[in-house]
Amino acid sequence: MDYTPDWDAAQQSVEPLAALEPELVIPGHGPALQGPEMLHALQTLARDFAPIAVPREGRYVDVPVHADEPGTISVPPPRV
């Protein structure tokens, strides 16, 4: 499972990337991806982000971490 402290920001980064229709994606982790299957998967992720990527439950699903350049401002409480 992937992790992010801000699912809305993650979706906002995927959508413009998919709109560029890249031939090659070199993520900060994992192997480089290319070809029509990658593009189709990226466009599908952008279109259907929440049901594909966002977990049903977890600490950061409903409330993201708030941070700025110096660091963390607030973190949601642990889910019990």
Image: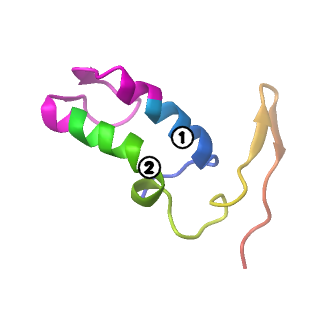
Is residue 35 rendered to the left or right of residue 22?
Answer: left
What amino acid is labelled 2 in the image?
Phe
Quarter occupied by the N terminus: bottom left
Q: Residues within 10 Å of mark 1 (few under 14, many from 20)?
A: some
What percent of the width, then of the height, locates residue 76? 78, 59
Colour option used: rainbow
Residue occupying the far right of the picture: 73
What amino acid is labelled 1 in the image?
Ala
Q: Above or below — where is 45 with respect to 57?
A: above
- Check whether the beta carbons of the residues at disc 1 and disc 2 lie within 8 A of each other: yes
Quarter occupied by the C terminus: bottom right
Q: What residue would you read off at disc 2?
A: 49
Q: Above or below — where is 35 with respect to 52?
A: above
Q: Residue at x 48, y 55 (%)?
A: 50
Q: CA distance from mark 1 to mark 2?
A: 9 Å
Query: Closer to the observer: label 1 or label 2?
Result: 2
Q: Above or below — where is 8 with respect to 58?
A: above
What percent of the width, then of the height, locates residue 79? 72, 73
Q: What residue would you read off at disc 1?
A: 10
Whether the magenta-drawn stretch holds residue 22 is answered as: yes
Residue occupying the far bottom of the picture: 80
Is residue 36 rendered to the left or right of residue 42?
Answer: left
User: Splitting the image into 4 quarters, where does residue 73 fall?
Assistant: top right
What percent of the width, then of the height, locates residue 68? 79, 30
Residue occupying the far left of the picture: 36
Looking at the rendering, the stretch of residues picked out in magenta corresponds to: 16-38
Q: Residue at x 77, y 25 (%)?
A: 69
**Image disc number at residue 63:** none
- Comparing 26 with 19, the one in front is 19
- Comparing 72 with 53, the one in front is 53
Secondary structure at numbered mark 2: helix
